[in-house]
Image: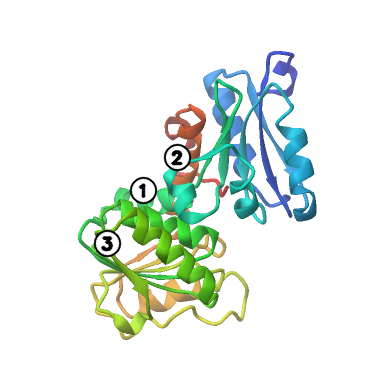
């Protein structure tokens, strides 16, 4: 949407986070609005963690505000501020999008996991009946765990440095998906068909590997959710050892498409191969 087209009928969407300067989501959505002739705009809103409750109280009074994309560090606290949660938000205990319903209430849900599963399926990787190891069970990792369960994986082993958080997420997944074999463990508890890094290890130069893919069977798919660098040290090593790999951008493209659908839009026909990271 061009700025000279914004008027009193323009619908508003925002993305909140701290920091906010690196987000690409507004560009993706505003390109879609412009191409489809939708009178809407998305802007970035820098909201500090300490101000989340005050900021949310103000935001939801804006009558032409239809949706919010939520990034760090607000994903977990926002799950307790909206009026209702979708199943992925309930399992993850965090949300990355919220929309205003017709009755004025706000509904939130989490699409990190949906994006991961969508990206895997678009690259031809079937998940039903598979055995998966997941490293990291924070906001993104817990959402991925829930989406993997929803996709029908047979076995899910999760690892995280925060033992109480790990226990809470495992219990939520067991409650929602009682047929799934899920529990804490390590990558040594394989074999696994798919292994996923959902930690930030690999974003900064000198980070330790989240795990060593070398001993894994050659057929094990190694997935990293990090988008910068695109090819992380984990994926570089996995490629050297002959393992199939999947880049983080596939997850984040699927995530952006899912968030747009949650808001009532078809981003897929406009987004091409680009992606956003809510």
Q: Quadrant of residue 153?
A: bottom left
Sequence-first disc among 1 and 2: 1
Give the residue at x 46% y 39%.
Answer: 257
* Residues marked 1 and 2 touching at CB (< 8 Å): yes
Q: Which residue is the site of mark 3? A: 180
Label for residue 118? 1
Vertical placement of residue 209 versus 277, above or below: below
Residue toward you, 222 or 151 = 151
Sequence-first disc among 3 and 2: 3
Give the residue at x 65% y 55%.
Answer: 72
Residue toward you, 21 or 152 = 152
> Around disc 2, counting alpha carbons within 10 Å, would you say few (fewer than 14), some (14 to 19), or many (20 or more)?
many
Q: Is residue 46 visible?
A: no
* Residues marked 3 and 1 touching at CB (< 8 Å): no
Give the residue at x 73% y 15%.
Answer: 7
Give the residue at x 57% y 62%.
Answer: 228
Residue extending furthest toward the left: 129
Q: Marks 3/2: CA distance?
A: 24 Å
Q: Marks 3/1: CA distance?
A: 20 Å
Q: Quadrant of the N terminus?
A: top right
Label for residue 258? 2
Image position, residue 111 (x, y; %): 47, 47
Q: Is residue 203 left or right of residue 16?
A: left
Sequence-first disc among 3 and 1: 1
> Around disc 3, counting alpha carbons within 10 Å, would you say few (fewer than 14), some (14 to 19), or many (20 or more)?
some
């Amino acid at each position: 949407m061009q700025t000279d087209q914004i008027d009193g009928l323009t619908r508003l969407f925002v993305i909140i986070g701290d920091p906010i300067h690196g987000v690409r989501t507004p560009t993706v959505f505003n390109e879609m609005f412009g191409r489809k002739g939708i009178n809407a705009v998305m802007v970035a809103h820098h909201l500090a963690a300490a101000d989340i409750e005050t900021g949310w109280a103000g935001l939801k009074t804006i009558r032409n505000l239809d949706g919010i994309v939520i990034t760090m560090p607000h994903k977990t606290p926002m799950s307790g501020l909206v009026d209702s949660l979708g199943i992925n938000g309930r399992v993850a205990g965090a949300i990355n999008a919220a929309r205003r319903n017709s009755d004025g209430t706000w509904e939130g849900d989490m699409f990190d996991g949906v994006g991961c599963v969508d990206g895997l399926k678009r690259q031809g990787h079937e998940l039903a009946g598979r055995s998966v190891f997941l490293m990291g069970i924070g906001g993104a990792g817990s959402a991925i765990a829930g989406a993997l369960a929803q996709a029908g994986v047979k076995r899910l082993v999760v690892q995280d440095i925060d033992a109480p958080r790990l226990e809470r997420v495992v219990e939520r997944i067991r409650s929602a998906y009682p047929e799934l074999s899920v529990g804490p463990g390590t990558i040594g508890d394989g074999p696994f068909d798919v292994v996923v890094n959902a930690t930030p290890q690999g974003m900064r130069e000198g980070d330790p590997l989240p795990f060593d893919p070398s001993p894994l069977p050659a057929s094990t798919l190694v997935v990293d959710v990090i988008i910068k660098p695109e090819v992380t040290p984990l994926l570089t090593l996995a490629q050297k050892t002959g393992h199939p790999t999947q880049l983080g951008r596939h997850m984040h493209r699927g995530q952006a498409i899912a968030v747009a659908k949650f808001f009532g839009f078809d981003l897929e026909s406009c987004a091409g191969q680009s992606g956003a990271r809510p």
